[in-house]
Image (cartoon, coloured by chain):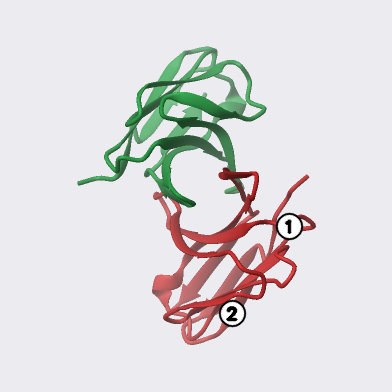
Amino acid sequence: DTAVSQTPKYLVTQMGNDKSIKCEQNLGHDTMYWYKQDSKKFLKIMFSYNNKELIINETVPNRFSPKSPDKAHLNLHINSLELGDSAVYFCASSYEETQYFGPGTRLLVL
Amino acid sequence: TQLLEQSPQFLSIQEGENLTVYCNSSSVFSSLQWYRQEPGEGPVLLVTVVTGGEVKKLKRLTFQFGDARKDSSLHITAAQPGDTGLYLCAGAKAYNTDKLIFGTGTRLQVFP
C-alpha cells in the first residue's frame, strides 16, 4: 500500500554513464515532482508535471530529462552523469497544497 | 531570491527541554508548511499555515505564521527522542502554489 515509491533506492555509477530513476504514486494525484537534496540537506525542486504535462522546469542541466507516461508515473533520466549529480533525488505527488514524498534515491557518481 | 533561512541549523538537546526553530524570509508567502524528515526517508508534512498570525498546535508542537506572512516558527515542548529529525519549512506563493520553496533545514537531535 505504498503511496509514492521510487526505484532504485541506491544507485552507484561511474561518471559519464546514463541512468534512470522511476517513480510511481497510487494516490490518484494529478501533480508529480522531482526534487534534489544535496549533501547539506537543501531540497530544491527540479520538475513538476500535471496530468503528464510539464509545468515547472527549474534551471536544471538538459542532461536531466523527465518523462511522464501517465499521471501515476514520473521517471527521471540522467545523461552523462557528473560527480556533482551525486545527491538524493525525491519524487513527490501532491493534492491541493500537501506534497507526499517518496523514500528517495541515493545517487553516487564515482 | 526567495530564500527561506532557518535557524538554528543544528540543535542538540536533552529529552524534556523546549526548543524553537525559526524560518525567515524577506518574501511574502501565501502559505507556509513544516515538514519533518527522518534519516533514509522523504519529508512528511506536519502542518500548513495560511493566515498571518495563525497559530496551530499538534500535540507538543506549536506552529506560528508571522503577521506579515514572511516568517514562521515551530516550538516543541518537552522534546522526546522521537522528535529527532530534519525539520524543513516550505513556502508557497499565491500565483504558483504547486512550487514549494524549501528552507535551509534544522537538524534536531534529542538525547534520552
Q: Considering the numbered disc 1 on the image, is that residue within a helix, a strand or a loop?
A: loop
Under mark 1, the amino acid is Val
Q: Position of residue B19 (x, y in %)?
A: 59, 79
The colour assigned to chain B within the rendered structure: red
The colour assigned to chain A within the rendered structure: green
Give the quadrant of residue A60.
Answer: top right
Residue pictured at 52% horizontal, 13% vertical? A79
Q: Is residue A90 left or right of residue A24?
A: right
Tell which of B13 and B61 is nearer to you.
Answer: B61
- What is the chain letter for disc 1? B
Under mark 2, the amino acid is Leu
Q: Position of residue B27 (x, y in %)?
A: 76, 55
Give the quadrant of residue A11.
Answer: top left
Closer to us: mark 1 or mark 2?
Answer: 1
Q: Residue B19 — which label?
A: 2
- What is the chain letter for disc 2? B
Q: Is residue B40 left or right of residue B13?
A: left
In terms of sequence position, does the residue under pointer 1 or pointer 2 come before the other?
2
Q: Can the viewer see residue B22?
A: no
Q: Residue B28 — which label?
A: 1
Q: Position of residue B81 (x, y in %)?
A: 42, 75
Tell which of B11 and B49 is nearer to you.
Answer: B49
